[in-house]
Image (cartoon, helix red, strand yellow):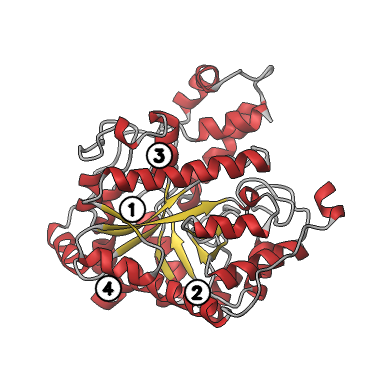
Amino acid sequence: MIRTALLAAVALMTLAGPALAQSADPAGEARVLRILRTTPLIDGHNDLPWALREGFGNDPHAVDLRVNQAATVLQTDIPRLRAGGVGGQFWSVYVPADLTPVEAAKETFEQIDTVKRLIAAYPDVFALATTADDIERIHRSGRIASLIGMEGGYSIDDSLALLRVFHDAGARYMTLAHSKTTSWADSATDAPKWGGLNPFGEEVVREMNRLGMMVDLSHVSEDTMLDALRVSEAPVIFSHSSARAVTGHNRNVPDNVLARLRDNGGIVMVTFVPGFVSEASRLWSIEVGAEVAKLVPPPADQAAAEAALQPWLEAHPRPNATLADVVAHIQHVRDVAGIDHVGLGGDFDGTGSLPDGLGGVDRYPALLAALMADGWSEADIRKIAGENMLRVMRAVEAVAASKVDERPGLARLAVDDAAD
């Protein structure tokens, strides 16, 4: 457990060499910003609420987000959101997977409260959204539609009733698992228990369909992805994942799942995390893990780990991921799943390093301009920016509307499963 925590900490360290210069395309970026005036750019995953919890006492007033924070640890602030043309943002209400379920539920509600206090702190900039119509209305008003995404099914404490309360509080997607396998869903980065979803996990998906809560399959195993696609009557999402055929990380989406999205109607919101978009960065992380395993006894904290590993890290700096790497993932998702099934989920403030050219939320125009330079049309850009996500949300809302007369689910986790 200690080594796992150290590996996670060291993997977040920004130890790459100097960022490489990116070729600027001012005309292309200006064209993108004109497009984003009428089509909201909707990002699927931003961890600013967790950054506020960790660094600022969960207080949106403890840091002035009206000031560019590029010189600090934050990757998100209002000037850069505006420069990036962001029109809709799913704020992640992440809490760690190693909490007890009761602690996770409490802290997730605290994070939902953080999002709502963030919105209240800057009412001229942000407004709470829970529907696709809300996003378009808020975007027309000149504000940024703010949505809530839960990252980790352990927060419902195996209770469909608690799932409903989270939905009532504003959560509009839930990631079924995070870094650890739960009592009903296998994680992509932990030992499997269920071969995907167990029967209670299937009931969770059905109840999410009834509520109109999007099923998020980032972080889950391939078997869990396939089970969710089989069970869900509504489109699923990957709020922040990339393509496994391009970078072989288990967190990414394999081609057989990408192909299934055509029939399901879902979306992969391509993420920017270096280890998920650069094969060299992924392999570097594995090498870091091997070096951490050699530390006996293991250092007690991140600072001690950095000190112990410093000679190796200086000799083996993190390889730089690039904007071009992200473009390659976006293009692969388009090639396999289709233009209607790709979006953006940067994971800003959820990763300690970012690709060259994508160092903050202001860089979306550069990414979209690069796609246009590769031949993407304005209609294509509108789809990846926001139209695809709006379509998915409306389809999820339609499924929920068709189930309005159904009774709430009362399924409980089987005793044998709960004991595992």
Point 19% across, 66% down: residue: 37
Instruction: Tell me the crowding category of disc 4: few under 14, some 14 to 19, or many 20 or more residues within 10 angstroms, Cα based.
Output: few
Residue 210 position in % (x across, y down):
59, 72
What's the amino acid at mark 1?
Leu
Point 54% across, 44% down: residue: 108
Point 40% across, 69% down: residue: 389
Instruction: Tell me the crowding category of disc 1: few under 14, some 14 to 19, or many 20 or more residues within 10 angstroms, Cα based.
Output: many
Instruction: Tell me the crowding category of disc 3: few under 14, some 14 to 19, or many 20 or more residues within 10 angstroms, Cα based.
Output: many
Q: Which residue is identified by label 4?
A: 375
Along the line of sight, the residue nearer the viewer: 73 or 251: 73
- Ranked by sequence position, the earlier of labels 3 and 2 is 3
The span from disc 1 to disc 2 (Cα, nearest Å) is: 31 Å
Along the line of sight, the residue nearer the viewer: 60 or 217: 60
Pointer 1 with pointer 4, Cβ within 8 A: no
Which label sits in the foreground, 4 or 3?
3
Residue 341 position in % (x across, y down):
45, 73
Which label sits in the foreground, 1 or 2?
2
Q: Which residue is identified by label 3?
A: 353
Secondary structure of residue under mark 3: loop
- Ranked by sequence position, the earlier of labels 1 and 4 is 1
- Ranked by sequence position, the earlier of labels 4 and 3 is 3
Above or below 269: residue 51: above
The span from disc 3 to disc 1 (Cα, nearest Å) is: 13 Å
The span from disc 4 to disc 3 (Cα, nearest Å) is: 29 Å
Secondary structure of residue under mark 2: helix
Along the line of sight, the residue nearer the viewer: 222 or 94: 94
Q: Which residue is identified by label 2?
A: 396
